[in-house]
């Protein structure tokens, strides 16, 4: 194994009814006023907004509301949240929603403590030294944002989808109640499954050193995603499946799976970010298109690991069988596997390839994923 430091200060409160304790958690951290951020009106229709508001009020914590955060969150909404946080002098940010809300909240929390434009933090003009305290109640399992210090936001003007990551962006407390996720649509369930698998395979396949214990962990988690997704498609009310899916999503990107690994990268995310930035493709849906095409292109770089994947996840005998099995499973559950399913044609590829260069530069892999290579991969997904 490579040397590593594992650090994760986020406290996870997992299980039914845990959201009722949000006021207590904020009180324990000395919070007096919070910016309460959310996405759709679903949390109001299902009563979660009122429950959270009551929990805050019971502990004497004032709240200011910011709704309307969209999937593939945008920098304009982040800027709006920063203005509100400053005007109302809040001393913490609370996310009630999925990863898009939490990513926005992280950017708001960092932006409030920075005197320039928040986009500077995304393009690397300056580092993140501090942020307002963050808290989260999760209503969708996919991104793993509840237990990591990273956030991804799109600049709708420049068509760039970039990330920030810094220790101050770890949530202080994240509440994960799988019962709150029962209302997630079928589409977003399968997109979430794709997203979680993508988080797991990036280091698994690309690392120059990947310990067997980590391989076994990743394989187990992928198998759990497959098993629980199929159960939830049949019975969305299955709490046991929902809880295992949610915890797997958290484990996939909290730093545990790639501890001891070395030399890995995120090419699938780098390529998919262009699809989201240019065409507003749901992130997980874009990943299910990119992954099989990338795997076919990358196979020759790490055949032994692809053979492990085929054998231990799908019971296949060859690497090619494993790739085909994953693509077939994506088709089975109904998440896209072709660019044409988004209306993206071969005529669009030059624009996509140019945009991808922004992200491969950001991820430090532009020397590998040249325009010619990205074109080959995307043609394999057409």
Image (spheres, rainbow, N blue to C red):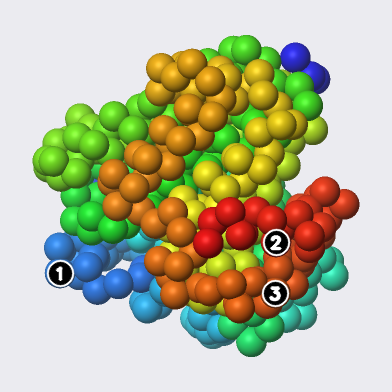
Camera-nearest residue between 134 and 251:
251
Asked whether the beta carbons under mark 3 and mark 1 sit within 8 Å of each other, the answer is: no
Q: Mark 3 Cα within 10 Å, few/some/many (few <14, many 20+)?
A: few
Residue 354 at x, y percent in the picture: 74, 72
Left or right, residue 177 beside residue 73: left
**Which label belongs to residue 45?**
1
**Mark 3 or 1: the one toward you:** 3
Q: Is residue 190 visible?
A: no
**Which label belongs to residue 350?**
3
Q: Which residue is mark 2?
A: 375
**Which label belongs to residue 143?**
none
Q: CA distance from mark 2 to mark 1?
A: 44 Å
N-term mark: 3 or 1: 1
Camera-nearest residue between 317 and 258:
317
Question: Which corner quadrant of the image does residue 45 belong to?
Answer: bottom left
Left or right, residue 373 beside residue 152: right
Question: Which corner quadrant of the image does residue 247 belong to?
Answer: top left
SS type, badge 1: helix
SS type, badge 2: helix
- The residue located at (28%, 58%) in the rendering is 187
- The residue located at (57%, 48%) in the rendering is 293
N-term mark: 2 or 1: 1
């Amino acid at each position: 194994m490579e040397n590593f430091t594992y650090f994760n200060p986020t406290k996870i409160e997992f299980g039914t009814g845990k959201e009722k304790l949000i006021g207590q958690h904020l009180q324990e951290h000395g919070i007096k006023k919070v910016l309460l951020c959310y996405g759709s009106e679903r949390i109001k229709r299902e009563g979660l907004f009122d429950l959270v508001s009551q929990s805050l009020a019971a502990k004497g914590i004032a709240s200011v509301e910011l709704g309307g955060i969209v999937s593939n969150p945008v920098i304009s909404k982040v800027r709006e949240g920063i203005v509100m946080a400053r005007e109302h002098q809040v001393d913490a940010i609370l996310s009630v929603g999925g990863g898009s809300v939490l990513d926005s909240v992280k950017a708001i929390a960092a932006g409030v403590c920075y005197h320039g434009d928040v986009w500077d933090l995304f393009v690397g003009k300056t580092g993140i030294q501090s942020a307002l305290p963050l808290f989260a109640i999760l209503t969708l399992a996919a991104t793993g944002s509840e237990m990591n210090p990273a956030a991804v936001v799109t600049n709708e003007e420049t068509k760039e989808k970039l990330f920030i990551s810094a220790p101050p962006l770890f949530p202080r407390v994240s509440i994960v109640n799988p019962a709150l996720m029962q209302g997630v649509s079928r589409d977003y369930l399968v997109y979430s499954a794709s997203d979680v698998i993508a988080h797991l395979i990036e280091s698994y396949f690309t690392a120059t050193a990947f310990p067997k214990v980590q391989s076994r962990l990743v394989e187990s988690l992928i198998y759990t995603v497959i098993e629980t997704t199929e159960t939830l498609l049949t019975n969305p009310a299955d709490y046991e499946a929902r809880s295992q899916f949610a915890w797997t999503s958290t484990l996939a990107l909290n730093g545990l799976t790639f501890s001891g690994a070395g030399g890995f990268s995120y090419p699938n995310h780098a390529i998919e970010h262009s699809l989201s930035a240019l065409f507003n493709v749901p992130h997980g849906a874009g990943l299910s298109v990119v992954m099989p095409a990338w795997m076919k292109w990358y196979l020759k770089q790490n055949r032994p690991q692809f053979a492990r994947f085929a054998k231990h996840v799908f019971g296949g005998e060859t690497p090619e069988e494993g790739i085909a099995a994953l693509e077939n499973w994506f088709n089975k559950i109904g998440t896209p596997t072709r660019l044409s399913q988004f209306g993206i044609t071969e005529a669009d590829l030059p624009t996509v390839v140019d945009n991808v260069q922004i992200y491969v530069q950001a991820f430090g892999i532009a020397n590998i994923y040249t325009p010619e290579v990205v074109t080959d991969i995307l043609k394999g997904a057409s």
